[in-house]
Amino acid sequence: MSEGQGVGQAVNQAVENHMVKAIITTLCCCWIPGIVAIVFAAQVNSKMGSGDVAGAQAASKQANLWGNVAIGIGIVVWIISLIYGILATGEEHGFFDFSRFLD
């Protein structure tokens, strides 16, 4: 394979921009890292259009990373909220009243 063929194949290579993940995580999980993911996802197509495949791949990797960070934060916040809700509800109804065991 000659050098010219390698360059032509690299330009035709598709790079996923992860825009859908970035938008969904911004709306549903955690908006700060979601916005960062949207910024990187938006850079992918423009870099591919200018022929910067390496830059597009780097932006795609960052968009995916920040989308996953937003999902992770969203899951942690959801679990903490669930635990807090269970404990708060149980406290209202006396489920967690341990004073009866201390007498």
Image (cartoon, helix red, strand yellow):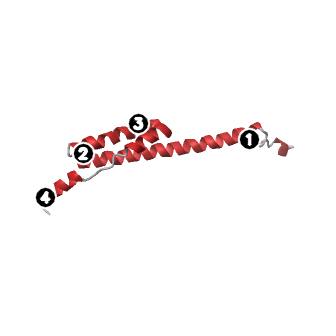
| Towards the viewer: 59 or 17 | 17
Question: Residue sitting at 59 percent across and 45 percent down?
Answer: 79
Mark 1–mark 4 contact, CB under 8 Å?
no
- Residue at label 3? 35
Q: How many marks?
A: 4
**Nearer to us: label 2 or label 4:** 2
Q: Mark 1 or mark 3, which has the lower sequence index?
A: 3
Q: What label does residue 3 carry, if any? A: 4
State which quarter of the image contains the N terminus: bottom left
| Towards the viewer: 65 or 22 | 22
Q: Residues within 10 Å of mark 4 (few under 14, many from 20)?
A: few
Q: Which type of secondary structure does the marked residue at label 4 adopt? A: helix
| Residue type pointed to by label 2 | Met
In the rendering, at what x and y percent does residue 20 appear? 40, 43
Q: Residues within 10 Å of mark 2 (few under 14, many from 20)?
A: many
Q: Mark 1 or mark 4, which has the lower sequence index?
A: 4
| Residue type pointed to by label 3 | Ile
Q: Mark 2 or mark 1, which has the lower sequence index?
A: 2
Q: What label does residue 90 carry, if any? A: 1
